[in-house]
Amino acid sequence: MKAGLAKAREINRLHTAKMVMECLISGLNELMVEQSGFVDRSTEGFQSLKGLARRLNLSFGLDLMKIREAMMELHKMAIDTVPNAMVVTGPSRPPANLLCLELAAEFSNKLIGSDKKFILDSINKTFPNPGENEGWMSLYTYRMSLDPDTMDNTSTHNEKLS
C-alpha cells in the first residue's frame, strides 16, 4: 500500500492528493451512514480516520513548493464539500460533514504561509458567523491549523462552550 501511494505521488502529486481527500471524505461518509448521520469527533471511528489522515500527510514529503498545488487542491476539496451540506442543514446549524475540515487540518502543515492566509480568508467568507456550540469545533480546529494567531480566539471560544 505504502509503495503504491509513493508511486502514485511520484507520477502525479495533484491526482494523489485528490485521491487521498476523496478517500477520507468517503470514509467520513461511511461513518455518517453507520452512525445515522451524526459523527461525534471523539468516536473511535473518527479518531482512526484522523490518524489515517495524519499518516497520509507524511507520504507527501517535506518540499512544500513541490506539493503546493496538490495541497491547495486537497484543502479546496475539503472546503467545497462542506457548504453543499449547509443547504440541507440550514445556515445556523453546523453541516454534518464539517468534520471534513478537521481531516484537512491534518495537512495544514504542508501549506506555505501565503496559501494558509488565502484559505483562511476563504473559510472566513464561507462561514462568517459560525455557531457557538460544540458542533462547530471542527471549523475552529481547522482555522487554528491555518493561523496560529487564532489560538487566542479559539481558546476564548472554547471557554464560551464550557
Image (cartoon, rainbow, N blue to C red):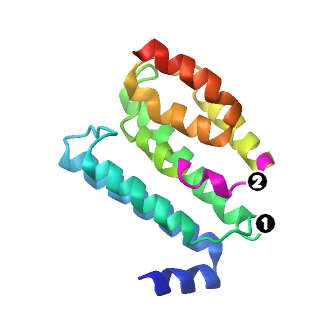
Q: Give the labeled residue for mark 2.
A: 112
**Could you say where residue 119 lies in the image, as x and y percent from the top left?**
69, 42
**Could you say where residue 141 lies in the image, as x and y percent from the top left?**
52, 36
CA separation in Å, label 1 and label 2: 8 Å
Q: Are marks 1 and 2 in contact (CB under 8 Å)?
A: yes
Quadrant containing the N terminus in the rendered view:
bottom left
Magenta residue check for 110:
yes
Q: Is residue 57 visible?
A: yes
Q: Amino acid at mark 1?
A: Met
Q: Give the labeled residue for mark 1.
A: 65
**Could you say where residue 56 lies in the image, as x and y percent from the top left?**
49, 67
**Could you say where residue 5 lies in the image, as x and y percent from the top left?**
50, 80
Q: Does residue 41 lie above or below 5 as drawn? A: above
Magenta segment boundaries in residue numbering? 105-113
Identify the residue shown where x is 55% and y is 39%.
Answer: 142
**Mark 2 element type:** loop
Identify the residue shown where x is 46% and y is 59%.
Answer: 53
Mark 1 / mark 2, whichever is N-terminal: 1
Identify the residue shown where x is 55% and y is 82%.
Answer: 6
Magenta residue check for 129:
no
* Occupied quadrant, residue 71: bottom right
Q: Does residue 86 lie above or below 157 as drawn? A: below
Q: Does residue 56 lie above or below 50 as drawn? A: below
- How many neighbours does mark 2 have within 10 angstroms: few (below 14), some (14-19), or many (20 or more)? some
Q: Amino acid at mark 2?
A: Ile
